């Protein structure tokens, strides 16, 4: 039989299987997709940098013998009582409401054991959270749900949230199915309704107002605790400059890989800059204001390993903050729960419907039965172990670079694997002295 | 009455003096020469009385608990923001965001209040003798906003469970805010608030506005309302 040879069927790159499923879902529902987590797309990241290590001209420190310090102080600019941490890794703001009480307790336990801080989220401070966190940062959010001066004075630091990496310029929505009696009471809203978290603060509109707002918060708390300003990775140079001019002790800068409890997928994937791209402009802003290492910079959004920690510090951060990675350490997206993830139409590693409150790991839920699955003591121990590994890894790299403190890491210790990473970070492309965009390049 | 002069004392010293008063205190203080300073009498937590002789800047009486703060002048933005309890009385006008996110207590503004009065209020009672500006009671969750004069555009936009009472004209209602039946319990509430605020008006002259509750759970059919 004569058959003319044909080419293989080709699926278009533009309309791949995922895109087609997106279109079919949109056509069936008429509403955009909401999910938790941060950007899932591949963007330039810390993997695109390498450390150079010691060599003929650099003198390494002896592993397991010579000390490499990891302690940091946050809030040394104005606060009487800066936060003193044993490690340069903090736990990012995540709310009771978005997370179960057990998960919040586990975060506190793990952070305490590792000598670091945790952070509240939208909805206020719970007594359990305060009780289980030796150092607690109290978020001051646009919604002001649960905000009160008593809790404000119990906090070890105040974090004014202007934005977050998953959705710079966006607010939030805690869907009705996660609004338990307690969550509703804390937020002064009826049970079961969707709770909108505003995208703008209700009583200030710009950096000049914010300066006065910070002054008010300091007057209420007696100028004792540091005031952080958290910004999403939108315009890191200008936003850092304005945050410092407004009087921040600490700038927390969250890139687009930073997670959220729930927002539109289109927002997460298409608004904001990668974490890697945000660091250099922020550090530059601090340096130009002569505030680098005087006001601290905390970087978040996709920190996973000790290498990521070390690279962020080498680029100029004073500390990093983790959210998604901390949840994974607690037990989120564990393959051991694969059967249950399959029932939810997903798979371990991809589960991101955190807003639905059906988390089989008992972390992103308010269902008492599901939440009870998470043992806060065991989960806290896992988080502490993970934090210790991150710290040990960062120390290992710092020693190899000859540094007796992880904050002594510097851009000169790095090279870039890609032109994009070199351009974003100001670090030379590996094997060259070329920094794209640099003067004379 | 202890006198505290902002011309001779730092703001920190004055606020520290006021904040040092405890639960049992019923002392009175007089603050002179406020000269538009910000954050005067913030974070108080005692049943003291503070009389501010002049006009203030931003956030006067912010996060107040228990105290009575009287301002014999006008106030800048965010007066009594996030107040928990107590009473704040403004003899003059108030700028934007008066009583923003406040949980309790009574805020009385004897003049007019600018835009976003009572924004995101969470239980406070606010009585404005004059008019209020646009977007007032935006996303207001709980409490009562009483206006003897007129209200600007988009009153009660995206309102939750707060009650709004207006005697004068309402330029326009915001999304999901509707006029509602005035029942006996509302008239009783109004009478109590008008009495406490020293306002001469009859509850029957007011109209009540509240949430239609159609935006409480996201519905794609409401997309046009956002």
Image (cartoon, rainbow, N blue to C red):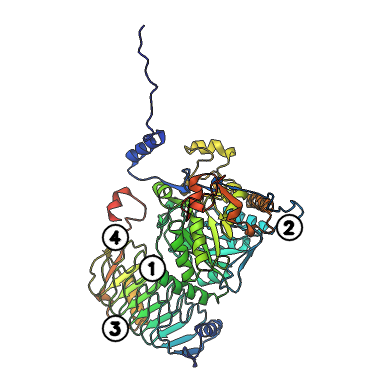
Of residue A356 and residue B213, the one placed in the foreground of this image is: A356
Nearer the observer, disc 3 or disc 1? 1
Label 4 sits on a secondary structure element that is loop
Q: Where residue A25 sits in the image (x, y, percent)?
A: 36, 38
Of residue B224 and residue A420, the one placed in the foreground of this image is: A420
**Label 2 to label 4, Cα distance in Å?**
62 Å
Residue A378's place in the image compared with B152, above or below, is: above
Classify 10 Å Cα crowding around label 3: few (below 14), some (14-19), many (20 and above): few
In which chain is the residue bearing label 2?
A: A
Nearer the observer, disc 1 or disc 4? 1
Name the residue that disc number 3 marks. Answer: B200
In the drawing, what numbered circle is on residue A67?
2
Name the residue that disc number 4 marks. Answer: B175
Name the residue that disc number 1 marks. Answer: A205
Q: Earlier in the sequence, mark 4 or mark 3?
A: 4
Q: Where residue A334 sits in the image (x, y, percent)?
A: 58, 41
Label 2 sits on a secondary structure element that is loop
Of residue A342 and residue A215, the one placed in the foreground of this image is: A215
**Label 1 to label 2, Cα distance in Å?**
47 Å
């Amino acid at each position: 039989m004569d058959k003319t040879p044909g080419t293989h069927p080709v699926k278009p790159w533009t309309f791949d299987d995922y895109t087609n499923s997106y279109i079919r879902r949109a056509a069936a529902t008429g509403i955009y997709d909401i999910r938790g987590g941060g950007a899932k797309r591949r963007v330039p990241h810390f993997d695109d940098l390498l450390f150079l290590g010691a060599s003929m001209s650099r003198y390494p420190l002896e592993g397991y013998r010579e000390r490499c310090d990891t302690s940091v102080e946050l809030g040394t600019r104005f606060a009487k009582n800066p936060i003193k941490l044993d490690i340069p890794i903090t736990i990012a703001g995540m709310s009771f409401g978005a997370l179960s009480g057990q998960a919040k307790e586990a975060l506190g336990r793990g952070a305490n054991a590792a000598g670091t801080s945790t952070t509240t989220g939208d909805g206020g401070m719970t007594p359990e959270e305060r009780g289980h966190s030796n150092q607690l940062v109290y978020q001051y959010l646009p919604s002001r749900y649960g905000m009160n001066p008593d809790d404000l004075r119990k906090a070890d630091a105040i974090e004014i949230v202007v934005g977050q990496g998953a959705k710079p310029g966006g607010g939030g929505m805690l869907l009705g199915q996660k609004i338990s009696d307690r969550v509703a009471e804390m937020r002064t809203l009826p049970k079961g309704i969707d709770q909108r978290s505003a995208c703008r603060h209700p009583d200030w509109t710009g950096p000049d107002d914010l300066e006065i707002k910070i002054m008010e918060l300091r007057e209420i708390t007696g100028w004792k605790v540091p005031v952080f300003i958290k910004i999403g990775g939108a315009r890191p140079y200008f936003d850092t400059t304005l945050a410092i001019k407004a009087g921040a002790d600490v700038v927390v800068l969250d890139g687009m890989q930073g997670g959220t409890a729930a927002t539109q997928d289109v927002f997460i994937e298409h608004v904001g800059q990668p974490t890697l791209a945000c660091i250099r402009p922020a550090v530059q802003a601090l340096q130009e204001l002569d505030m680098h290492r005087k006001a601290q910079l905390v970087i978040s959004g996709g920190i996973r390993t000790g290498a990521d920690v070390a690279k962020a510090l080498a680029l100029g951060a004073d500390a990093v903050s983790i959210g998604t990675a901390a949840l994974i350490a607690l037990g989120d997206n564990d393959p051991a729960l694969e059967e249950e993830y399959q029932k939810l139409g997903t798979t371990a590693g991809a589960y991101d419907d955190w807003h639905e409150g059906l988390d089989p790991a008992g972390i992103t839920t308010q269902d008492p039965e599901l939440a009870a699955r998470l043992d806060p003591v065991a989960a806290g121990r896992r988080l502490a172990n993970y934090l210790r590994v991150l710290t040990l890894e960062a120390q290992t790299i710092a020693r190899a670079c000859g540094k007796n403190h992880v904050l002594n890491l510097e851009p000169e210790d790095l090279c870039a694997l890609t032109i994009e990473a070199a351009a974003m970070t100001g670090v030379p492309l590996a094997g060259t002295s070329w920094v794209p965009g640099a003067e004379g390049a | 009455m202890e006198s505290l002069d902002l011309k001779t004392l730092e703001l920190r010293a004055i606020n520290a003096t006021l904040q040092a008063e405890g639960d049992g205190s019923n002392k009175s203080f007089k603050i002179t020469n406020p000269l538009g300073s910000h954050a005067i009498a913030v974070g108080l937590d005692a049943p003291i009385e503070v009389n501010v002789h002049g006009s203030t800047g931003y956030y006067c009486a912010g996060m107040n608990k228990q105290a009575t703060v009287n301002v014999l002048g006008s106030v800048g933005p965010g007066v009594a923001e996030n107040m928990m309890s107590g009473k704040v009385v403004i003899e003059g006008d108030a700028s934007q965001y008066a009583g923003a996110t406040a949980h309790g207590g009574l805020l009385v503004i004897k003049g007019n209040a600018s835009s976003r009065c009572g924004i995101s209020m969470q239980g406070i009672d606010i009585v404005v003798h004059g008019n209020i500006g646009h977007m007032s009671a935006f996303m207001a969750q709980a409490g009562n906003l009483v206006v003897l004069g007129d209200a600007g555009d988009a009153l009660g936009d995206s309102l939750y469970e707060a009650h709004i009472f207006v005697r004068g004209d309402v330029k326009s209602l915001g999304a999901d805010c509707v006029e509602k039946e005035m029942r006996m319990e509302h008239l009783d509430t109004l009478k109590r608030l008008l009495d406490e605020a020293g306002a001469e008006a009859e509850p029957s002259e007011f109209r009540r506005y509240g949430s239609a509750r159609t935006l409480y759970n996201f519905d794609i059919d409401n997309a046009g309302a956002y």
